Structures are given as structure tokens and as C-alpha cells.
Image: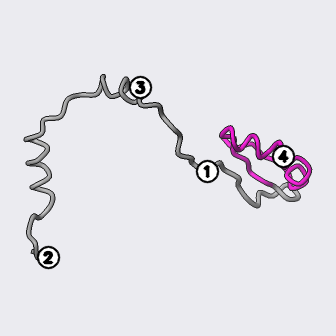
Amino acid sequence: MSREITQRELRNLSGAIMRELDEGESFIVTRSGVPVGELTPLRRHRFVAAETAAAIFKSAPGVDYRRFRTDLDEAASQDAMPGG
């Protein structure tokens, strides 16, 4: 849920607000008590170590490659000509 801050707080506390954005906090900015904007953190690509990714995928279900290929063939045309 977004925290409400005033225009004055945004101006005077911009450094602290930016740090909170980095931590995932969102804000609704108000002027004279009326909401005028929203500050939300951008989604960032986060590095995941190979060991962590491997551990996560160990518990993933297996893939039936023949069924997968059949599903792909049913969904996508293999014709070389567009619209074919």
C-alpha cells in the first residue's frame, strides 16, 4: 500500500524518500490534501547466483519434450511463407 506524503515532504525529504523507493516503498504525493501523483519503484533486474537458480529448478516439474513439441506445432505454423 502506498504511503501518502505532501509536496513539501517530497521537496524537503527527497533523499530519504529515494532510499525508501530503492527499498520498494511507494508514495502518493498530495498538494493541499489532494492526491496529485504517485511514486513507485521501478522493477530492476536482480542478479541470481547460478547455484541459487540451480537449486530452485531442481524442484521444478520435469518437461515432457514430445508433448511440448506437439503443443508448439499446434500453436505455431511451420510454413515458410507468411500467412500460410
State the CA–CA distance, disc 2 to disc 1: 38 Å
Query: What residue does disc 3 label?
Result: 51
5 and 60: which is toward the camera: 60
Q: Which mark is residue 42?
A: 1
At label 2, counting other C-alpha atoms closer than 10 Å, the crowd grade (few under 14, some 14-19, many 20 or more) is: few
Q: Which mark is residue 83?
A: 2
> Which quarter of the figure is the N terminus placed in?
top right
In terms of depth relative to the viewer, which is nearer, 8 or 64?
Answer: 64
Name the mark on residue 25.
none
The Cα–Cα distance between marks 3 and 1, rounded to whole angstroms, is 26 Å
Tell me the amino acid under the disc marked 3. Answer: Glu
Magenta residues span 1-29
Q: Amino acid at mark 2?
A: Gly
User: CB of mark 2 within 8 Å of CB of mark 4?
Assistant: no
User: What's under tag 4, amino acid-wise?
Assistant: Gly
- Where is residue 62 shown, x and y percent of the image? 20, 29
Mark 1 lies on a secondary structure that is loop
For residue 68, above or below residue 38: above
Q: Which x, y percent locates residue 31?
A: 85, 59
